[in-house]
Amino acid sequence: MTLWLYALQRGSALILAPLVIAHLALILIASRDGLSAAEILARTQGSVAWAAFYGLFVVAAAVHAPIGLRNVLRETTPWQGRGLDLAMVLVFFVMLALGLRAVVAVVGT
Amino acid sequence: MGRIVRQELDVSIWRGGPGGAQGAFHRYRVPQRADQTVLDVVTWVQRHLEPALAYRFSCRVGMCGSCAMTVNGRPRWTCRSHVGKVAPGGRLEIAPLANLPVIRDLATDMTGFFEKWQRAGGRFVPTLSRADPPVRISAESPQRKAADAGIECINCGVCYSACDVVRGRPDYLGPAALNRAWTLVNDERHGDVPGVLRAVSEDGGCHACHSQGSCTAHCPLSLDPSAAIAGLKRRTLLDLIGL
């Protein structure tokens, strides 16, 4: 289980690294060009490519963050054991649901 | 000890029982001498001022690994730490090793430290008997070189005391035990490499390491436990994905 969590966290980090760079670049380009929300949505709605990009982003972030948070909490607080593990599973589902909801809002027609 | 060269050292030594119970630093004036080690200072205090001072040492020449203490905030072998180098201002603060339970004063309980060597699969499992001829292993093989790089560890506990992950997670195996495990993974004569890889992949194993490298920075033998742990992480990951 520990090894699997380690592999999942490193694997998701590998996926996230280029996606985060692309995401940040995208923010800079979109805001510098002064695109309105409507103009952005016109480009993203119905786009399979944007859905795949941000869908993968959300899944990787939802996997990555709770594993790291669990490690931080285990090392810095007395919170250990099953309760913490279940809470982190909940964090995973909450992040996944919120993230996918945002993706649907941006690419849905 | 050599002749008295200058003046007195201002020495604070931790005195106290288990768990820091009623513990405090006590100050002593100790004559400064040429070529004086921190162990010389502790021994002088015990022989002249505090006969009940508890501390541990054996060989006095950096062979046995029993005299490690926290000197001016850093874990060190006291027998190989010259006062002139570690306390040029003549002020010494000597405490027991961190991350280990204190028995009394400067003596720590190493039981948990050695139990973790066992937990990490540190026991050699032979594949041959004494009736078999010795295995011929090239000293130049990459595996043997990786094993040789960590094999000189003398279990002094300095890396364990310097490790911030051990401080945060007392169940973490620690750099010394994992360094031992890595030498066995690379020992072609060892009969249970999968067992070692399983042991170091348990909760509190090599994957808990933050790669801060404090172990490597403090090792008195200049070994590199941090690289050994990185090797274990790599090896377990490759095993998991079948490479």
Image (tube, grey):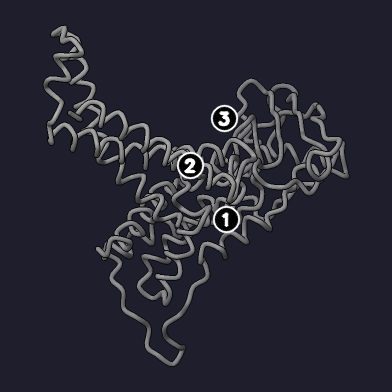
Q: Amino acid at mark 1?
A: Asn
Viewer-side label of 3, 2: 2
Q: Residues within 10 Å of mark 1 (few under 14, many from 20)?
A: some
B8 to A65, vertically: above or below: above
Q: Which residue is mark 1?
A: B155
Dividing the image into 4 quarters, which one contains the C terminus of chain B?
Answer: bottom left
Q: Amino acid at mark 2?
A: Leu
Residue occupying the point 46% across, 88% down: B130
B167 to A108, vertically: above or below: below
Residue B127 occupies quadrant: bottom left
Residue occupying the point 45% across, 80% down: B126
A29 to B68, vertically: above or below: above
Side of A41 where B168 appears, left or right? right
Q: Which residue is mark 3?
A: B85
Coordinates of residue B165 in the picture (x, y in percent): 54, 42
Q: Amino acid at mark 3?
A: Lys
Q: Nearer the viewer, residue B148 or A14?
A: A14
Viewer-side label of 2, 1: 2
Is residue B80 among the parts visible in the rendering? no
In the drawing, what numbered circle is on residue A18?
Answer: none
Q: Which residue is mark 2?
A: A90
Chain of the residue where label 2 is placed in the rendered structure: A
